[in-house]
Amino acid sequence: MQQRFYTITQLTQEFAITTRTLRFYEAQGLLSPQRRGRQRLYSPADRTRLKLILRGKRLGFSLAEISEMIGMYGKAPGEAGQLRLLMEKITARRTELLEKYRDIELTLKELDEVEAGARSRMAEIGGVFEDSAAPVLREEEA
Amino acid sequence: MQQRFYTITQLTQEFAITTRTLRFYEAQGLLSPQRRGRQRLYSPADRTRLKLILRGKRLGFSLAEISEMIGMYGKAPGEAGQLRLLMEKITARRTELLEKYRDIELTLKELDEVEAGARSRMAEIGGVFEDSAAPVLREEEA
DNA sequence: ACGTCTTTTTACGTTAAAGTCAACCGAGAG
DNA sequence: CTCTCGGTTGACTTTAACGTAAAAAGACGT
């Protein structure tokens, strides 16, 4: 089991982030790379955690939320009450994620419509110049 | 065509936001409700825009990005160049959204695994008290 | 050994998205 | 008329997530 390590700049290049960001995440307790002297050495596990962090960010979670989510892995609460709490958190996250899932579906559908409108207008312009009607903001019932 | 309006507090209650938030969005040009004297009157169209804004927020977009996305609706650029630009933006957004889509799928899958682990530990505790092994953070290859 | 480059630490600055607070206005109830 | 209730405006404050700058310590190629 060869432990390959990454330097800070390797990670910044791979994930297009800055050193400041990595050190900030460390200060927030999201990462804790080893040290060789004063230098940081990121293990593959650290790299994986970083990927999880960035994924959380893409989905709009705060660092605090991400911290909590990552904490769900790795930890094995021994007490029953703690386990119940964990399960509740999981359910809450799942609900939240499914909501985002539907949000994305809706948004994608709307993008399709806008694109369709744009295509037809492109076609018109390709022929003769005419005025075209703007697509209207629908109002579905709540 | 009866134009029903909403007061600012109605909207805050319906969407669980504050008046400050609504006025802030207005100051940012995301909403522009009519006025009756100094009072704001939100039309159904305003309400729909608000829903779009909140959806964008849930997905982690900034208000500036949301503003641009909403701008895609409603506008009908007459010039061909503008249309091409619009199409490009649409493509970019779609790519971004699909990425989030996959992010969610991954996260949901991982939640499932954590939950499964928690369940089995619950079962153990239900029986006799034993030590249980913590689930480990996998490292898939990049 | 030397200069250059990277890394670290510390400290202060910045931006987006609101929250909080204070003071004021206008409409209707009593 | 006075009181109260919403609504409005403006100023100030806050928080998260970094950016930027400065100074010093290693690390590296020649």
Image: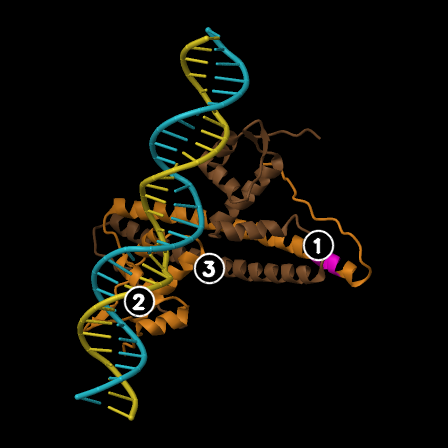
Chain colours: A orange, B brown, C cyan, D yellow
Q: Residue at x 29, y 71 (%)?
A: A43
Q: Which mark is residue B31?
A: none
Q: Picture quarter containing residue A7?
A: bottom left
- The residue pinned by badge 3 equals B103
* Magenta-drawn stretch contains A23: no
Q: Residue at x 52, y 46 (%)?
A: B55
Q: CA distance from mark 3 to mark 1?
A: 29 Å
B133 or A37: nearer the viewer = A37
A85 or B69: nearer the viewer = B69
Q: Which mark is residue A46?
A: 2
Q: Picture quarter containing residue B112?
A: bottom left
Q: Which mark is residue A117?
A: 1
Point out the tag, 1 or 2, that comes first from the N-terminus: 2
Q: How many marks?
A: 3
C9 or A137: nearer the viewer = C9
A122 or B132: nearer the viewer = A122
Circle 2 chain = A
Q: Quadrant of the N terminus of chain B?
A: top right
Pointer 2: residues within 10 angstroms few (<14), some, or many (20+)? some
Circle 1 chain = A
Q: SS class of the residue under badge 2? A: helix
- Image coords of residue B68 (percent x, y): 57, 52
The span shown in magenta is: A118-122
Disc 3 with disc 2 on a shared chain = no
Q: Amino acid at mark 2?
A: Asp
Circle 3 chain = B
Q: SS class of the residue under badge 1? A: helix
Q: Amino acid at mark 3?
A: Asp
Q: SS class of the residue under badge 3? A: helix
